[in-house]
């Protein structure tokens, strides 16, 4: 986590690959049933996406979702140097602040309670085919089968909300990290992967098969138009 917070984030801006500082561009967001949340730039999340989509889209970035207030608290500790790997002398002993800080986080932050994983993916564009929209129970726009062509800017949103499964004892983080890896390994064994060798997964994996396998494991993706 410290790495993601102190290294730069690689993004696409104005159609070009560039870097922005992590823990910046803070924004508020909401998920039904959750307290106020926030999201901010963090490193590593875009992986190979900037290279894959360079020339196809104008903007691409990745932000981490946390409870409101998290960013300011952690940014203060980073600014104080608690995430630095440069040695300092304390009581005649050389110590690395980052090492001490990491140990304190593991000591004091809860790690074994029921957890949630929230994912929000948004595509913004114009002139695309979009579903006719109607209001669902949550007030969010829900798509229907009829399609219209519209030049207005629209946002297509996909959300995942996953939680600890008491029946299996698997945390939400276990489910949303191990299950995708298992799905892809099984797709490779079944020769359902489109490319061979070391290739970005967004180029090699059939998304329809992948999403169907997630749903079979009760990881569902909700879709809405805004």
Image: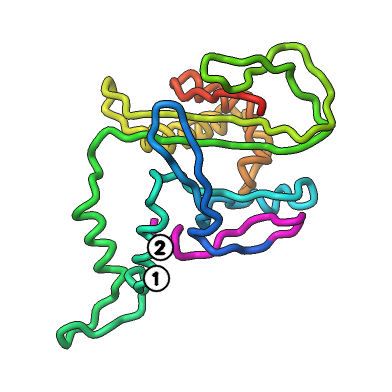
Q: Quadrant of residue 202?
A: top right
Q: Position of residue 161 (x, y in %)?
A: 45, 29
213 shown above or below 116: above
Residue at 27% from the left image edge and 20% from the top image edge: 167
Q: Are marks 2 and 1 in contact (CB under 8 Å)?
A: yes
Q: CA distance from mark 2 to mark 1?
A: 6 Å
Foreground residue among 181 and 144:
144
105 shown above or below 89: above
Residue at 45% from the left image edge and 27% from the top image edge: 32
Mark 1 crowdedness (10 Å alpha carbons): few <14, some 14-19, many ≥20: few
Q: Which residues are magenta?
A: 1-17
Left or right of 53 on screen, residue 168: left
Foreground residue among 129 and 220:
129
Residue matched to label 2: 75
Mark 2 crowdedness (10 Å alpha carbons): few <14, some 14-19, many ≥20: some
Residue matched to label 1: 79
Left or right of 100 on screen, residue 136: right
Q: Quadrant of the N terminus?
A: bottom left
- The secondary element bearing badge 1 is classed as helix
198 shown above or below 182: below
Q: Quadrant of the C terminus?
A: top right
Residue 151 is tagged as none
Q: Position of residue 8 (x, y in %)?
A: 54, 64
121 shown above or below 59: above
Does residue 11 show up magenta in the picture?
yes
Left or right of 111 on screen, residue 57: right
Residue at 32% from the left image edge and 29% from the top image edge: 164
Residue at 51% from the left image edge and 60% from the top image edge: 22
Question: Total of numbered circles in the picture?
Answer: 2
Foreground residue among 132 and 97:
132
Residue furthest to the left in view is: 91
């Amino acid at each position: 986590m410290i790495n993601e917070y102190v290294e730069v984030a690689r993004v696409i801006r104005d159609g070009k690959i560039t870097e922005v500082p992590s823990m910046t561009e803070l924004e508020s967001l909401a998920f039904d049933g959750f307290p106020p949340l926030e999201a901010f730039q963090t490193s590593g999340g875009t992986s190979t996406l900037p290279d894959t989509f360079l020339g196809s889209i104008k903007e691409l970035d990745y932000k981490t979702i946390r409870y409101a207030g998290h960013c300011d608290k952690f940014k203060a500790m980073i600014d104080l140097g608690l995430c630095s790997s440069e040695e300092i002398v304390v009581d005649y002993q050389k110590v690395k602040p980052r090492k001490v800080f990491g140990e304190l986080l593991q000591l004091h932050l809860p790690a074994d309670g029921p957890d949630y994983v929230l994912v929000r993916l948004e595509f913004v564009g114009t002139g695309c085919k979009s579903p006719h929209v109607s209001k669902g129970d949550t007030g969010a726009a829900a798509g229907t089968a009829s399609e219209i062509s519209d030049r207005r800017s629209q946002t297509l949103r996909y959300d995942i909300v996953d939680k600890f499964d008491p029946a299996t004892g698997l945390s939400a983080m276990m489910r949303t990290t191990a299950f995708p890896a298992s799905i892809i390994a099984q797709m490779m064994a079944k020769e359902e992967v489109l490319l061979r060798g070391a290739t970005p997964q967004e180029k090699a994996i059939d998304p329809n098969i992948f999403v169907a396998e997630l749903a079979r494991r009760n990881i569902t993706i909700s879709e809405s138009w805004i």
